[in-house]
Amino acid sequence: MQKRFVSIWFRHLTTDWLTLRRPELKTLPFVFAAPEHGRMLITAANPLAEAQGISPGMALADARAVVPSLEMADHIPGKEAKLLKALGEWCIRYTPLVAIDMPDGLILDISGCAHLWGGERAYLGNIIKVLRSKGYDARGAMADTLGAAWAVARFGKDKPIIEPGEQAGALLLLPPMALRLEIETLERLKKLGFYTIKSFMGIGRSVLRRRFGTQLLLRLDQALGNEDEPLDLLQPIEPYHERLPCLEPIRTATGIEIAIKTLLENLCRRLEGEGLGLRSAVLKCYRLDGKVLQVSIGTGKASHFVNHLFRLFELKISSIEPDLGIELFTLDATKVEEADPEQEMLWSPESGGLEDTGLAELLDRLANKVGTGNIRRYLPQEHYWPERSVKPALSLQDKRTTEWRTDRSRPSLLLSRPERIDVTALLPDNPPMLFVYKNIVHKVSKADGPERIEREWWLEQGEHRDYYRVEDEKGRRYWVFRSGHYSGDQTGQWFIHGFFA
Amino acid sequence: MLNTKQDIINKLRKDILLMEGFNPPSAGGVSSIGLGDIESAFPNGVFPVGAIHEMMCPSPEHVAASSGFIAGILGSLMEKGGACLWIGVGRELFPPSLMAFNTEPDRMIFIDVQKERDVLWVAEEALKCEGLSAVIAELRDISFAESRRLQLAVENSKVTGFILRNDPRKAGTSTCVARWQISPLPSETEDGLPGVGYPRGQVDLLKVRNGNPGSWQLEWAEGRFVQVNKEAAIHEFVRQIG
């Protein structure tokens, strides 16, 4: 079958994108620049800047000399690839075969697609019109070969559609640059006076090979259609979705279990093959009476183990009311992440600590029952204020950034809110002699302190605390503090905050 | 004849111990967990890991003392890098304090449940998980049947469980392998210097299956449990009163 290709060239890919994000830039000349060897080099310029003679590769300082009002944005590495991937995925509506052509283009294999849009002219016109209306300055060309389409899209002067078999004629007047050659070959061609492809196309192949290497011949053949060129096609990701229609409406727990297992097996087989794991999933049950029941689970670590995921769903089965019966089950993986491959361990430690798979699975089950927010792990934080000396860890893999302090003794139990106590103490800074807590008088026999902890003024206002570690006659140890300095009003300054072991 | 009978009985006793989960001291493994003399109260002289211990804690002071005691034991249980679960309703444990007892607080995972009922469910699930070193549950009360379920769970997984019973007035029978009560004792400083000394506690082993209950005084000093000389303590007590 006759092959046809479309090449799309985005002349101002990144600048167009930024203009879409920040419309006020539309009327200003601006550039993207990145630091290189201690100076800022321009990586992309918008049409207004280009009109004033600024081109990629210039130093930003030089460009500022030309246009003092030049706006600058930081170059974002990898942005082009991301934009092209998104645009390429959008282009799949025109043809299933789309490839990214770094750094600024797309290649569409449109063999047998154009007639659906009413001919090649309307087809190409539609693509370019829609892209331009979205704000991307796109140029496109169509030809029998990828190389010819690429050349015409970038260097073609008159018509963008090259009729079948006419690519040789179209290439004649284009510069050698249109052949996607390396910079050394191009310089050598220029030095020898070859300004158009026509001027060297007729020369014998062996001569060309000797002078310019095999790459020139390969590119020429590819443009003319004598040589095939492989495409690295974009593979759109299918949504992780499974369906299970039931012949008979399902009304029993056993039936629901079987349905969930079947769905999970299918989904997990696919996830496993792709090296992925599931982080959250939604099961929807469509009932005969039109109601949709929804159950969702989440895991703390990407997993594709059917048994584990099933046990998470198992906890929720009791909340599914089949009523008249369920006729359709669907399972969506709403969040999918890369899963660590299970590693066979030669020496299995007795317990794997926090990385243990069994533990992660247990926590998933607990999280689905008691709620994720109720599972906590603490890491040290560099604050003296006791309530702020720990912070909750975000995940099981979270490592502490600072060491646990052991130089100051801290109580085993800390009351979430200090409780007021009545105290008899000597002025000005002696520990209490006795205190009353919950109607019990504790006579203090030993005490340590005070340890003054100031409030962090950049976080909150208030009085400091003078902490004492006291032990009563029976050996019970407490952490009490006096809030602030002594003042005229002596009452209500003492608090109990914790219990020592 | 009598001799052989005695032998048979001894053999049977050993078999029963094995069935109940008491392992004889292994030749290579570290069997001591740093409790010193207390370990000899247990059958075979080994602190039973992979079993449930219950701690009687009538007051917050007892909870504090028990958590210190447990943290000291956890230090050796978690030596190989294991993780640990702490389940409770209104938890007040302050993680940084564990560090003083050689237990890394960031390897402790806290499950704060809303209802007392859930503690048992979570504890049972956790005790079935072989990847854990220990599970600590704060409970008001536990019935015989409930404790039996927990015991069955640990028999397979060999996880050590601790139950802190906050309301032990109704302390009925349970299947737990040991019942403890840890109460705080007045600390002592060297040469009568002022200030509070090392944490000290009265460790009462109220019940132990196939072992000998007893009572000890322990002090946590410089990273390990030290048994306090009883006579000196009594002497000190007399001196204080007199």
Image (tube, rainbow, N blue to C red):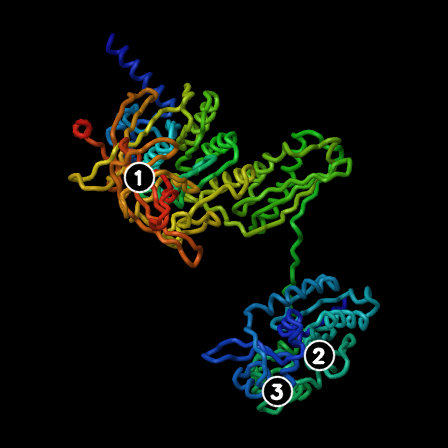
Mark seen at residue A424: 1
Chain under callout 1: A
> In front of the other: label 1 or label 2?
1
Disc 2: which residue: A152
Residue A307 x, y percent position in the rendering: 56, 37
**Residue type, label 2:** Val
- Mark 3 or mark 1: whose residue is earlier in sequence: 3
**Residue type, label 1:** Thr
Residue A290 x, y percent position in the rendering: 77, 38
Tag 3 and tag 1, C-beta contact below 8 Å: no
Mark seen at residue A356: none
Residue A417 left/right relative to B211: right
**Residue type, label 3:** Gly
- Mark 2 or mark 3: whose residue is earlier in sequence: 3
Residue B57 x, y percent position in the rendering: 38, 29
Tell me the CA gap for discs 1 and 2: 94 Å
Disc 3: which residue: A53
* Label 3 environment density (alpha carbons within 10 Å; few <14, some 14–19, many ≥20): few
* Label 1 environment density (alpha carbons within 10 Å; few <14, some 14–19, many ≥20): some
Q: In the image, are marks 3 and 1 on the same chain? A: yes
Tag 1 and tag 2, C-beta contact below 8 Å: no
Q: In the image, are marks 2 and 3 on the same chain? A: yes
Q: Compared to A375, does A26 lie above or below?
A: below
